Amino acid sequence: MRNLTFILISLLLFTSCKKDLHSLSGDTAMQLDKTTAYLKSQLSAADFSSLDFAKPDLTILDSGQILLWRVPFAGKSIATDFVLVQAGADGVCTAGRIIHLENGLGNGFVYNDSVSIQSLGRQSILQSGIENGFITALHPSVIRQVSVNSLVSVDVVPASAGADVLPEVVIVGYINSTGTPPTLASYMSLLTLMASSPNGGSGATGVGGSGGGGGSGSAPGTTTSPVGGGSVNIYTPLAPNGGGSATLSPSLLTKPIEVEAEYTTNEPAIDITAYFKCFDNVPSAGATFTIKLCADLPVNSNPAYVTLGSSSGHAFITLTKTNGSLSVTQSYGFYPTQSISLLNPFGNVIGGIKDNGGHEINASIVMTINESQFTSIKTNSIAWSTKSYSLAGYNCTNYALNVFNSMNSIPLVIDPLTVYLPNSGNTYNPGAPPQTVNIPDSPQALFVKLQRLKSSGSSAAGNITIDQTHNTISPISYGPCY
C-alpha cells in the first residue's frame, strides 16, 4: 500500500525523547565536553565562536556505539545550519562536517532543496540539490529518471536503480489530540551527511547492513536489511523541537526512527490464476488448508508512522495447501500498477496482484480452512484482483481483508483512519481548515487490531503473531503454473 505515503504522512504521532542539558547523565556531559574540545581544535576561531553550545542535539545509534552531535550556529536554526560530529561510545570524536541546508523545513509533502557539506576546515565536500528527498549528487543515475509529477517519483526510485534505495530526507507529520491541523517535519539521515566525501568514499563509520539511501556502495544510514529484501535507514528530525527556529529548547536527546523500504513496489504484476493453478498439484482428498492475513509496517517501532520516500506499509495473504509430503504456498497482495496522480490522489487507477513471497510480516493471523472455503478464497482472490486501486476506496488492505473475511462467519473488522490533508499548498486560501478523508482499511489499523486481539487474550490470540523486528517473513511463493 505504498501509495498511501502521499496521503498518510499526516498520521504520524510525532514523538521525541528530549532532555535539558542539566538533566543529561555525567557520561553524556563529559562526551559533550570532548565534542566541544574537538571542535575547538578543528574549527577556525571564528567558526568556533559562532557556535551555540547551549543548544546542541544528540542522536544515539547502534546501541550507543555511535553518537551524532549537532551544534547550531548562533542565531540560526539547527534545521538549516549546524556542525555535525560523529563520536564513539567513549565520546572520542572521529569526524565532523559543517552543514547548510537551504530550507530545513522542506516544501509541503516533498523535500526539494539544496545542501552544502564542508569539512571542519571549510573545504567543500559536496554541494547538491535535493529532489524528492534524494541528494542528487549521491544518485546521479537515479534522479534523472525521477519525475516530479507522479507519486512513484516520490515513493521510490525507478526499478532500474533498485527498489530498495531510500532517500536522504523524508517528511513526516503529526496530528495532536485537539484535532488541529497537522504539522509537517523533515527527517534526515545524518550518517549519510557524515559519510559524504568528494570521491564518493565514506568519511565516517556506518552502522551494519547494506542497501538503503546515501551514495554508492554500503549505506551509512542503514541499520539492517530485512531478510525478505529491501532496506532500512535511520532518520533524525532536523528540527527536534518541531519549529526549526533559533529558539529551540536547550540540549535535546533526540530519538531517531527506522524507515523500511517497500521492496516489491517495482516488481511486475503476476497472473494470480496461474498461481492458483499450482494448488492442483496437491491432491485435495485429505489435504489441509491454511490462510494467513499479514500486515507489514514501514516503521516497525510504531504503527502510526508513515513517511514520504518509502513504503507506507502493506497487507497481503499467504495461502497453503498440504497433503502429506506435498505442499504449495503462495503469498500475494494487491497494488496499483500505475502512478497515482498528485492532482487526484483518490482517483482510481489500474490494480493488480504481486508476489509477496519473502515479504516481512509484523502482525499476522492464521486460520485452518476447509476445501469449500479454499475454493471461495480462490474465486474471490481472482475476481477482486481486477478491481481498480483507490487509496480511500480499495487498496491492499481492503483486498487482503476482504479475501480473509470471505470465508469467515464473523468478519474481522478494523478501525478506519481519518486522514488530514494540510493546506500548505493552498495559496488561495491558506487559512482554510484541513480536509479530512476516511480510509476504511490500512496496514497500520490492521496491525493495531491484531495487536489488541493478541494482548486481550481473545479466542483468536493463539493464532496471532506479533513481531516488530525484521525477523519474520512470509514463505517464498511456489510461483506460477501453466
Image (spheres, rainbow, N blue to C red):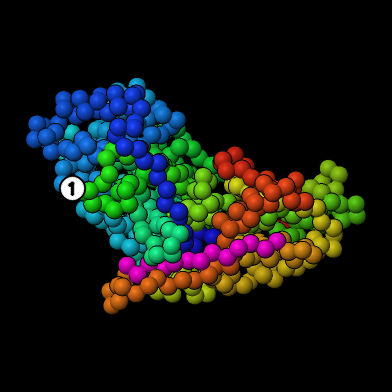
| Residue positioned most to the left | 46
Bounds of the magenta segment: 412-424
Residue 351 left/right relative to 135: right
The residue drawn where x is 60% and y is 53% is: 447
On screen, residue 425 above or below 266: below
Residue 465: horizontal and vertical position, in percent?
A: 68, 45
The residue drawn where x is 32% and y is 70% is: 425
| Residue positioned most to the bottom | 428
The residue drawn where x is 91% and y is 55% is: 285
Q: Quadrant of the N terminus?
A: bottom right
Is 271 in front, or is 38?
A: 38
* Residue 384 shows in this picture: yes
- Amino acid type, callout 1: Lys
* Residue 329 shows in this picture: no
Mark 1: few, some, or many residues within 10 Å (few <14, many ≥20)? some
Residue 467 left/right relative to 66: right
Magenta stretch, main secondary structure, is: loop
Residue 433: horizontal and vertical position, in percent?
A: 37, 72
Is 354 in front, or is 268?
A: 354
Is residue 126 within the magenta segment? Answer: no
Q: Quadrant of the C terminus?
A: bottom right
On screen, residue 334 above or below 323: below
Is residue 415 within the magenta segment? Answer: yes
| Residue positioned most to the right | 285
Image quadrant assignment for residue 61? top left
Residue that label 1 marks: 76
Tell me the element at label 1. Answer: loop
Residue 39: horizontal and vertical position, in percent?
A: 19, 29
